Amino acid sequence: MELLVGLDLGTTGVKGILVDQNGKLLAVHGEKLSLSTPKPAWAEQDPNEWWTAAFKVLKALSDHATRIGGTIRALATSGQMHSLVVIDKEGHVLRDAILWCDQRTYTECEEATNLLGKEEQVLKMVGNPILTGFTLPKLLWLRKNEPEVYEKIYKIMLPKDFINYMLTGSIKTEHSDASGTTIYDLSKMCWSEDILKALKLSKEILPEILPSNGIVGKVKDEIARELNFDEVIVVAGGADNACAALGVNVTEPGDVMVSLGTSGTVVAPTYTGSYDPKGRVHFFAHTVPKMRYHMGVMLTATYSLEWFKERFLYEEYDEINESVAKVPIGSSGILFLPYLNGERTPHRDPYARGVFFGLSSFHSKWDVVRAIFEGVSFGIKDSFEILKELGLEVKAVRIAGGGSKSKVWNQMLADVLGVEIQKPLVNEGASYGAAMLACSGYFNLDVRKISRDWFKLRETTIPRQENGELYEKVYARFRKLYGVLKETFREGHN
């Protein structure tokens, strides 16, 4: 039995899955990661800890493969986007990785944007504004603030590429992750010579770009012996959201993925579309050849509920869902702005904060909790509205992430968006898409076909028109509230 591994390097943990060549899920194993915040708004991790966790995951999956009489042939990785890893000529990590959620680079973003001719010009060059989460400003911050580290840089890497390097000794990346650096030209699908020249950066420190199903190399002999691997190849893999979209067969224009996780994302592939001229949604390369996608991002989706539950609720999620379902649409007049840590789409406002609006002595805690469900759903709708403006014609919406376990939330999203919500049978996120890439790379098969063949539908949620009409009225109030509070948010940070 020939087996494949999909490995996903997230922010809070590393998860690996073992599948057969038909996509049947055979085993799942995860290891947790720690996060360092050495200063306010900073976020770092030790790449060596990633490797330790990844090794444990791979060993557990290898042992399982042996027990069931199978042979692992290939693995591919997905990973958190944008985070910066730097190594020297000996291959040693020079400092902890600066993560995607790190906010230290406001100054570098502004300086780079001005040097490149303002944001309109930046969007033309790389399809995205230069934001604090992206890789480029992190590199510029290093050059300015830690020159002794910057001078020793041999190569920069993205998180999943570091794991591939540790496995193979080969330094490579692929298009979906490269496109999230703001050093990548999406029209030419290569590193941007204009960016490098204008910002005086050396192309030598950038890795070679492969297709997402391209082969990075074989697992090194010493690692293979420890993992009991036999001639296992490592396929390049992809960025987490692109892999998650692939894993639920969102590969063609009209397909949409809604990921309802700690953060919320809306991914919509496109052949001919271009960047958002207002920079509200991202524009990246997909794991599917020559395909790009638009992506809206809300920073605190299910985390909004987790935050509230941890502090104010003792009930478990089953009871929470049952109680929320009994509250009428509109949460008895309460609105919730889900901007606990700022917001990306559509506002791009780091100063925005969470708000409960309309509270009175009449309300119960379940009115408040339902307002959280609705506020997150409206945040997802914000991205949908922008994508429609950019030409999106929705054919199918597939839902992923932990929030998809809630039937209440699925129905709410179907009603709010006015679309059918499809829930996949296998909900393993980016690791399942990575396994598809491993299959594509090893067997030299079309990754679109693999995605179609492996995807199975668990259930479908149909929108209710009468509910949708009620939600539209509440959504109009939701949209208005941010505009009223925008300047007040900023004043609170002065």
Image: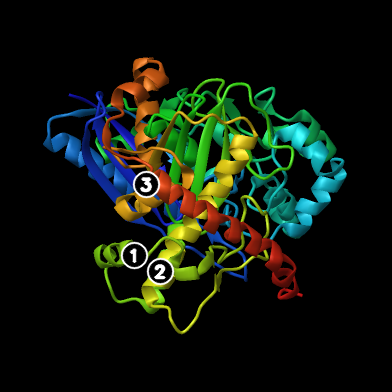
Three-letter amino acid code of the residue under disc 2: Val
Dot 1 lies on which element?
helix
Quadrant occupied by the N terminus: top left
Q: Residues within 10 Å of mark 1 (few under 14, many from 20)?
A: many
Residue in view at x 68 percent, y 33 percent: 275
Residue in view at x 70 percent, y 48 percent: 139
Name the residue furthest left. 68
Q: Residues within 10 Å of mark 2 (few under 14, many from 20)?
A: many
- Residue at label 3? 54
Q: Please say which color scheme the image uses.
A: rainbow
Residue in view at x 64 percent, y 41 percent: 181
Dot 3 lies on which element?
helix
Q: Earlier in the sequence, mark 3 or mark 2?
A: 3
In this view of the protein, can residue 161 be seen by the observer?
Answer: no
- Residue at label 2? 369
Q: Is residue 271 above or below residue 493?
A: above
Name the residue furthest bottom. 361
- Mark 1 and mark 2 in contact? Answer it, CB < 8 Å: yes
Residue in view at x 78 percent, y 36 percent: 195
